[in-house]
Amino acid sequence: MTITGILMFFDIVPGYVAFAHEWFSWIFVIGSIAHVVVNLRSFKNHLKSDWGRSCVAVFSIIVAVSFFSWGHITMPQLKWPIAEALVNAPIAALAEVKRTEPDALLRKLEKQGFSGTPDQSVLELAKQYETDAFHLLGVIFLPDEK
């Protein structure tokens, strides 16, 4: 969690770093709950102290405040609306975004085994080939592997 969290903080997210971080967080939550259950008497005693209650209050406030953006648009807020727009856009529109010709984009897709038309969306193409739409977006937007 620490390593993947630090990598994500600095926007170094190769491969499955974000995926691992998200799933390991569940293991961390389960471990935390197990730790509290095993040490329940100590935990209750800790919460009786001013320091224990203060720690819980401060961290609860920090978590609550993190739910608000106060008008600042963040990258995670944009991730899904942009992804939805991309998978629903025609391939010709994606070619324009990428500043390439639709035929060049279609050839790139065909090299990977996906034959489509300029007016077809990535989502339609993904359904046609029973593949993940994000895989097709990767074929379109990521550089060719040498």
Image (tube, rainbow, N blue to C red):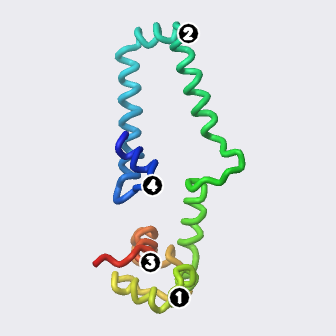
The first of marks 4 and 3 along the sequence is 4
67 relative to 93, above or below: above
Tell me which residue sits at (52%, 7%) in the image: 48
Which is more foreground, mark 1 or mark 3?
3
Residue under numbered circle 3: 140
The first of marks 2 and 3 along the sequence is 2
Question: How far apart in space, not on screen, are marks 1 and 3 (Cα)?
Answer: 13 Å
Residue under numbered circle 4: 11
CB of mark 1 within 8 Å of CB of mark 2? no
Residue 132, percent from left and from top: 42, 68
Residue under numbered circle 2: 50
| Amino acid at pointer 1 | Pro
Residue under numbered circle 1: 118
| Amino acid at pointer 4 | Asp
Q: Secondary structure at mark 3?
A: helix
Q: Secondary structure at mark 4?
A: loop
Tell me which residue sits at (37%, 86%) in the image: 110
Question: How far apart in space, not on screen, are marks 2 and 4 (Cα)?
Answer: 38 Å
Which is more foreground, mark 4 or mark 1?
4
